Amino acid sequence: MERLDTDLLFRWFVGLAIDDPVWDATVFSKSRDRLLDAATAAHFLGAVLAQPRVKKLMSSDHFSVGGTLIEAWASMKSFKLKDGSGDEPPSGSGRNAEVDFKGHKRLNETHAPTTDPEAKLYRKGPGMEAKLAYLVHPLMENRSCLIVNAYLQPADGHGERNAALAMIEPLANHPTGITLGADKCYDARVFVNEL
């Protein structure tokens, strides 16, 4: 948004004339929410993958699946008790005062972020810091490394395998079978049996 005020190339790319006013930043976040709620992003990906030139690049029998964290747009300071008790104003001055969380047990069952209620507190591994996050799981075909499906969900620690099964199931009727590559977190007896 700041570059639109000073960079003519940015203005040209989005269709703004030199003297046109720049939009308010909230326009983008509202539009993004509308697009994702309406499943427009999924329809767009489907339309791209249906193009004959793209289909020629894709393998239909070798896939890989993975998962990664996407940090939520929520502050840890907004992670408060769900029942509203214990909401003490932070000490200090200013609107973004320091908060000391040491010694306070914070769990997804009892707490939720007020700025993004669907985000979950999640730790990627032992000894790592917990963050408010979502999990995203892309399914990629292996010939050209194109993403053919993606799944976004709250971070709960069990979603990777469920998302992989949901994304691979429509491809499972291949006449000669398919292969699926994944990292060690997918190496669970239940998941392998489902495959």
Image: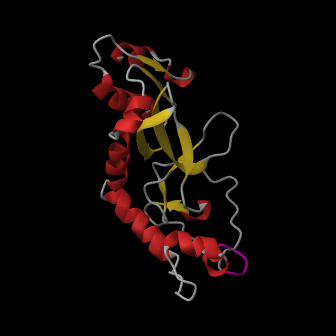
Tell me the quarter of the image containing the N terminus: bottom right
Q: Return the residue found at the far top.
A: 176
Q: Position of residue 192 (x, y in %)?
A: 41, 15
Most foreground residue, 52 or 23: 52
At 49% from the left and 49% from the top, the residue drawn is 108
Work out whether residue 106 can be spotted: no
Query: What residue occupies the far front of the structure in this picture?
Result: 53
Q: Magenta stretch: residue 117 in it? A: no
Tell me what residue is drawn at x 72 percent, y 81 percent: 93
Residue drawn at point x = 49 percent, y = 22 percent: 186
Q: Is residue 173 above or below residue 100?
A: above
Say whether residue 14 is visible.
yes
Above or below 183: residue 104: below
Left or right, 39 with reference to 131? left
Where is residue 188? Give x, y as percent: 47, 17
- Magenta stretch prevailing secondary structure: loop
Give above or below for 107 relative to 74: above
Out of 55 and 6, give the one closest to the viewer. 55
Q: Nearer the viewer, residue 88 or 33?
A: 33
The quarter of the image holding the C terminus is top left
Q: Does the segment drawn in magenta span residue 91?
A: yes
- State the scheme by which the image is colored: secondary structure
For the record, the magenta segment spans: 90-94
- Total marks placed: 0
Please state the horizontal and vertical placement of residue 87, each as a whole percent of the image.
Answer: 54, 69
Figure check: 25 above or below 66:
below
Work out whether residue 105 or residue 29 is closer to the camera in this orientation and state it. 29
Residue at screen point 35% across, 50% down:
44
Where residue 98 sits in the image (x, y, percent)? 71, 69
